[in-house]
Image (spheres, rainbow, N blue to C red):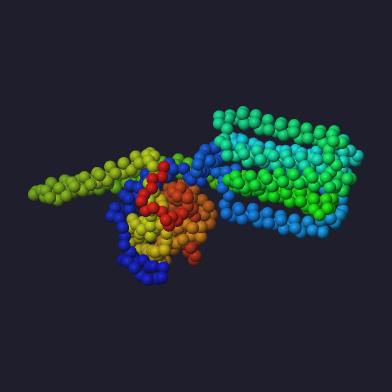
Amino acid sequence: MRLNSRRMLGKPEAVTFGGSLPRRHKLAQNLGERLSVSDRPLPLFRRVAAVMEGSTPGPGGHVRVLSNLPPSRAQKRLALGVVLVLFVCFVGAAGPLSTIPLTRVDAFMPAYGTAIFVNDSISAALLFAQFSVLRSRALLALASAYLWTGFIAIPWVLTFPGVFPGAGPLGAGLQSTACLYFCWHVGFTLFVIVYVFLKDLDPIKGLSESGVRAAVLASVGSVAALVFGATVLVTAGNALMPPIMLDTVRISNVWFYVAGPTAALIVVTLVLLWLRRRSVLDLWLMVVLCAYTIEIALISFPVPTRFSLGWYVGRVYGLLAGSLVLLILLAETTMLYGQLLRAVLAQRREREARLMTGDAVSASIAHEVRQPLSAMITNAGAGLRWLDRVTPDLDEAKAALKKVVTDGHRADAVIENVRALFKKDARTWTSLDVNNLIREALGLVRDDLQTHRIVVQAERNERSPRIKGDQIQLQQVLVNLLTNAIDAMATNDRERVLCVRCEVHDSGSVMVSVEDTGKGVEPSAADRIFSPLFTTKAHGMGMGLSICRSIVEAHEGRLWATANLPRGAIFHFTVPAHPEVDPESETVG
């Protein structure tokens, strides 16, 4: 009987098995280490929980959210692309076609104002929610900025000529709408300036939940009061306003004296943001300010007038400026809740595995202790028979007693490993060679491979990068998968081939695959084989694959199964590659 190993190129090579302990005793010795993975929280859940609870997992003690997360290179390129598209559209719309009068659509303004109000109100609500977690004054100011634009859109629509007959419900004059437009943009810009100077300050300390609610309510009340005051000023004081409008369509040259300083203020704010940019939120606020600047330019050049192509395009820019940050906030919220859901499910599986390991531990104790106890009884009986002979054989009796002592130490080791289940020492992670892990795991199941006449194809990959992890835990994952493959082929009358290989995965991880030619996994059980207490074996406990998945996920990897055509199954698991990891061991708390 001979075990064969073939390289990936097909060259036969003898298998060198490592380890001298019997496989079952080695499993018992490592049981505590294998199951104690639950003492170490999953990295994903730790990060998401940190965001939700306001802890400080990131560098510098900051929670990694949109308001302080540095933008990636891809995000910078996307923002630059959006600005370039806005500029190209401006060049196309600001030409001679911009003065072409289009059909006046009176229903356009209510729809446009409603969209601005809804978008900016949702943005303000999301920013208030982040303020309630981070206690950042800057986020409170920025939420007030979007609340301002959402609130002021209401009187702007109510005073727009043609939406309501006559002076409308607010008694607006000819200049009221134009003045509210500048109040809209100047007010938002001033709030952003406040945000720029507050965002580097420390969060508010000792602010209770009632204090957060009071701050939010005060902000909402203050913004509403400012919008009310601005509305009263431009409607009741219409005669005092600058003559920006010649009539309900044509715009006078006074527009440039107001639009110029407004655009300059926006550019100054844009420069301040550029100099003090820190986060993804800062990046997209700069895009918003660029859109506001282009919007004013579209209305101003070449001839300022309402209901022209340039004017309508300017309205689109205004709506886009109000939607950019909302889209980013919604994307972040969706991603956050997606991570939270995955983390909660992973924690639930981890808790279930921890609760269900009692049966696995008791069964393992019974099995492992029974073996040395049976050996002790057998050896003690043999020693007595050697002593009961007419001529006692003291040497044979002494050898039997030595075996009794050895088996006693084995039983003691089993009990000590059970105590390890309840220890919460720091995990020791080392730099590991996946090929060595595979070789050692094959050595632990050597007896079963020989008993069932299974041909082994161990495909060694010299180009496989090193990984960082717990050697005992990852070895136990391999041993469990190998044992399952052996059991699946034990009753197989056809050729029995076990293939183990490692390769670099597309995601930059190292993927290990265990392939067998057994009976495979039933489609009805494919989604349940990793659940605790679910088993397809007559005498199985349903804990092996569940524990394996907990170990792999704790190493930031993934474990899954696929079919091995024409028969059998393939179990894959990935572990992130660390090609430049320090070979010295690293203690992970």
**Residue 178: horizontal and vertical position, in percent?**
82, 42
One can see residue 345 in this view: no
Q: Examine the rendered structure and indicate whether residue 474 appears above or below residue 265.
A: below
Q: Examine the rendered structure and indicate whether residue 579 appears above or below residue 381.
A: below
Snapshot quadrant of residue 188: top right
> Residue farthest to the right?
166
Q: Residue at x 84, y 50 (%)?
A: 305
For this rendering, which residue is in front, 528 or 126?
126
**Residue 247: horizontal and vertical position, in percent?**
89, 45
Q: Residue at x 46, y 54 (%)?
A: 576
Q: Quadrant of the N terminus?
A: bottom left
Q: Residue at x 65, y 56 (%)?
A: 81
> Residue farthest to the left?
391
Label total for image: 0
**Residue 385: horizontal and vertical position, in percent?**
16, 48
Q: Quadrant of the C terminus?
A: top left
One can see residue 212 in this view: yes
- Looking at the image, residue 200 sits to the left or right of residue 176; the answer is left
- Looking at the image, residue 324 sits to the left or right of residue 384; the answer is right
**Residue 545: horizontal and vertical position, in percent?**
45, 51
Q: Residue at x 35, y 66 (%)?
A: 4
For this rendering, which residue is in front, 18 or 144?
144
